[in-house]
Image (cartoon, helix red, strand yellow):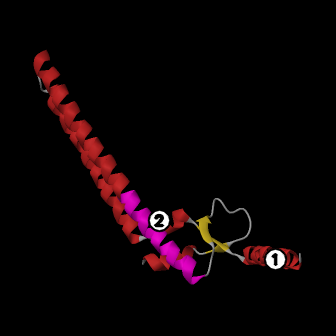
Amino acid sequence: MKNLKLMALLMTAGIVLSGANAANAEVGYIDYQRVLDNYPAAQTAVKEIDAKTLELQQYMLEQEKQYKNLSTPLQKQNFENQAANTLKSKQEALMKLQRDKEAQILSQIQTAAKAVMVAQHLEAILSDQVVFVGGVDVTDQVISKLK
């Protein structure tokens, strides 16, 4: 019986102590858009995607000019089919490039945020849009880790 009481007392003390530790836990947050705006690799990726988008728009304008110069309906139909297939593959390549760049940048930001989290002894780092009150702004530390 004494062992049960002692065990219950120890368990209660453990729960109280773990609750106290959780109460002292700090959460960090970052302004993700500001990180993107200040991260050179993200800016380079945006410029690369914009350049590819412009290339696609130029391709479409060139195809439109060529289409207007065709005379027979059969030529126009064949040209439409070929242009549609080429356009679809170019659009898919652009979307893949965008997804790959976004995943790469996100991974790099997460790695930097994890390093800041460990260095600052934080429990987690959230987006600033999720935090209503409290927390520690670690945006500048994440930006400096990325540079």
Q: Which mark is residue 7?
A: 1
- Place residue 45 in its image quadrant: bottom left
Residue drawn where x is 88% and y is 76% of the image: 5
Of the numbered discs 2 and 1, the one sitting upstream in the chain is 1
Q: Toward the viewer: 39 or 126?
A: 126
Q: Toward the viewer: 7 or 25?
A: 7
User: Circle 2 is placed at which residue position?
Assistant: 36
The N terminus is located in which quarter? bottom right
Left or right: residue 34 versus residue 53 is right
Q: What is the crowding at mark 1: few (fewer than 14 residues within 10 Å), some, or many (at least 20)?
A: few
Magenta highlight range:
101-120
Left or right: residue 14 versus residue 128 is right
Q: Position of residue 37 (x, y in %)?
A: 47, 66
- Helix, strand or loop for disc 1: helix
State yes or no: discs 2 and 1 in contact (Cβ < 8 Å). Answer: no
Q: Toward the viewer: 49 or 15?
A: 15
Q: Position of residue 48 (x, y in %)?
A: 30, 58
